[in-house]
């Protein structure tokens, strides 16, 4: 049941990211980059509220302070409960960063960088780098002296987070790359004003659009496999937690290892096939993207999983031999 709920949550995340990705194209001034969310939207709303009148300005200042002081409020809550440590003092720095980020999101004209549109991306990236740095340090401190059961729970949470990241890569980065490529080709095609000439050029661009979609699928395929691998790894952890010597645990590890091998083979083959198709139909394409991928890290991961499967099988045999001897 919990896994079904998590799958539903991933589907909701994918839908939300897909909508945001489309809004980034259609409403570029409101959704510039994912790292500026939700500061950019909050800044636009607070600025509009502040300009609405005296009452609106007072409400905007109150919300600005409330939003920016939220990490400090959480730190005070930890202190009252006696659960704070030295790492939690970084929450104060996060509050200071929020004051700066929110202020310039409300007044973007006051923050200027030489890169066009890079101001909001820089502000959001600085805050999120500090925020995730705090989270990582907090997690390391939490699990540094944890027992086996707690470590397994922590690993399950980390696997869940990895799936969230994989969905983000598919539905934001890869989908955004696809939409951006289509928009670039359409903008180049907009130079043709005559209807007949425009329709002729649009029909010539259809193979390019088709290959852009295929490239999106090829690039997204490894992350789809990664999501499945994470769920299989979660199943392995559950079986190992129940009984590491059971047939179910061995079967779960074998299933994980077998899927990893097949997924890597399909990923490599799909990349090779896509490059060959581009070679065959290169004369019809207005954009070509040939990628030479050497999945060294994926091969290492597969070998580690296979080795783990062998170790668990050997442990089970030793356990059965010891039981028979006793």
Image (cartoon, rainbow, N blue to C red):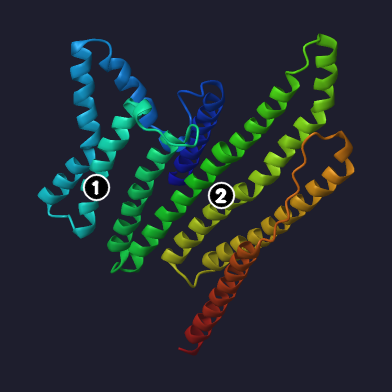
Residue that protrudes farthest toward the front in the picture: 114
Q: Is residue 188 left or right of residue 227?
A: right
Image coordinates of residue 243 in percent, x first then y, are 44, 68
Going from N to C along the chain, the mark reached first, 1 or 2, is 1
Question: At x 48% / y 45%, what residue is drawn?
Answer: 164
Q: Secondary structure at mark 2?
A: helix
Q: Is residue 25 left or right of residue 145?
A: right
Residue designated by label 2: 227
Mark 1 is surrounded, within 10 Å at the Cα level, by few (under 14), some (14 to 19) or many (20 or more) other residues, namely some
Which quarter of the image is occupied by the N terminus? top left
Viewer-closest of 310 and 246: 310
Viewer-closest of 72 and 102: 102
Which quarter of the image is occupied by the C terminus? bottom left
Q: Nearer the viewer, mark 1 or mark 2?
A: 1
Residue designated by label 1: 93
Image coordinates of residue 120 in percent, x first then y, are 42, 34
Q: Is residue 271 left or right of residue 27?
A: right
Q: How far apart are the two marked residues, 1 and 2, measured between alpha carbons?
A: 34 Å
Q: Quadrant of residue 61?
A: top left
Question: At x 48% / y 86%, what residue is drawn?
Answer: 322
């Amino acid at each position: 049941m919990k896994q079904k709920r998590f799958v539903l949550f991933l589907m909701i995340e994918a839908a939300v990211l897909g909508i945001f990705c489309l809004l980034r194209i259609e409403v570029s001034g409101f959704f510039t980059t994912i790292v500026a969310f939700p500061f950019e939207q909050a800044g636009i709303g607070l600025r509009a509220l502040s300009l609405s009148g005296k009452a609106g300005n007072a409400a905007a200042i109150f919300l600005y302070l409330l939003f920016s002081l939220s990490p400090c409020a959480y730190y005070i809550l930890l202190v009252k409960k006696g659960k704070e440590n030295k790492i939690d003092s970084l929450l104060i720095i996060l509050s200071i960063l929020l004051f700066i980020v929110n202020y310039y999101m409300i007044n973007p004209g006051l923050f200027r960088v030489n890169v066009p549109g890079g101001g909001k991306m820089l502000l959001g990236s600085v805050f999120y780098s500090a925020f995730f740095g705090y989270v990582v340090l907090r997690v390391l401190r939490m699990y540094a002296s944890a027992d086996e059961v707690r470590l397994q729970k922590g690993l399950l949470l980390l696997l869940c987070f990895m799936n969230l990241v994989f969905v983000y890569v598919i539905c934001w980065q890869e989908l955004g790359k696809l939409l951006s490529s289509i928009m670039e080709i359409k903008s180049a095609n907009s130079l043709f004003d005559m209807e007949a000439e425009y329709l002729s050029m649009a029909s010539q661009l259809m193979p390019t659009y088709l290959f852009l979609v295929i490239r999106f699928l090829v690039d997204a395929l490894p992350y789809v496999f990664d999501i499945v691998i994470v769920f299989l790894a979660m199943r392995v952890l559950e079986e190992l937690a129940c009984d590491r010597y059971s047939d179910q645990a061995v079967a779960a590890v074998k299933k994980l290892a077998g899927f990893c091998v097949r997924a890597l083979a399909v990923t490599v083959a799909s990349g090779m096939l896509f490059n060959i198709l581009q070679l065959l139909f290169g004369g019809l394409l207005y954009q070509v993207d040939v990628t030479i991928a050497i999945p060294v890290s994926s091969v290492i991961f597969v070998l580690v999983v296979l080795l783990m499967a062998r170790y668990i099988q050997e442990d089970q045999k030793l356990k059965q031999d010891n039981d028979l001897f006793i």
